């Protein structure tokens, strides 16, 4: 995951849908995100899986995060 500040964080991806995704943050990055923050993802094993889409963090429960896809392109 790449934050809008350019910080890269390795995450554990759990759920992928057309509108969003769910993932776990590592303990060391538990405070790196906040609700409404925009993030981008890159997937080393399948670069087309997430493409250049942006996501907005919608929920944070402990280390589990839910993000919704934003329709506009990453700028």
Image: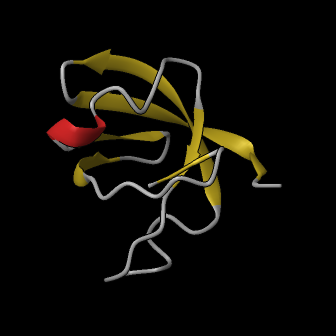
Measured from the top left, where is residue 44 in percent x and y? 37, 80
Between 62 and 13, the one lying in front of the other is: 62
Q: Is residue 56 visible?
A: yes
Going 75% across and 55% down the picture, which residue do you hit?
A: 74
**Above-or-below relation of 13 to 4:** below
Extreme residue in the right direction: 75
Counting the numbered discs, the total is 0
Q: Is residue 25 visible?
A: no
Measured from the top left, where is residue 26 in percent x and y? 19, 44
**Above-or-below relation of 29 to 49:** above
Query: Is residue 26 rendered to the left or right of residue 47?
Result: left
Query: Is residue 15 rendered to the left or right of residue 20?
Result: left
Measured from the top left, where is residue 34 in percent x and y? 47, 21
Q: Quadrant of residue 37?
A: top right
Q: Quadrant of residue 75?
A: bottom right
Query: Is residue 62 rendered to the left or right of residue 55?
Result: left
Give the colour scheme shown.
secondary structure
- Which quadrant: the N terminus? bottom left
Between 53 and 10, the one lying in front of the other is: 10
Going 31% across and 83% down the picture, which residue do you hit?
A: 45
Going 20% across and 29% down the picture, which residue do you hit?
A: 63
Going 22% across and 40% down the picture, which residue do you hit?
A: 28
Measured from the top left, where is residue 54 in percent x and y? 63, 48
Between 33 and 67, the one lying in front of the other is: 33
């Amino acid at each position: 995951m790449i934050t809008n500040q350019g910080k890269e964080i390795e995450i554990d991806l759990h759920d992928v849908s057309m509108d969003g995704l769910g993932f776990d943050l590592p303990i060391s990055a538990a405070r790196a995100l906040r609700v409404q923050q925009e993030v981008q993802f890159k997937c080393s094993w399948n670069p087309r899986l997430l493409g250049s889409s942006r996501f907005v963090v919608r929920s944070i429960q402990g280390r589990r995060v839910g993000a919704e896809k934003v329709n506009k392109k990453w700028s």
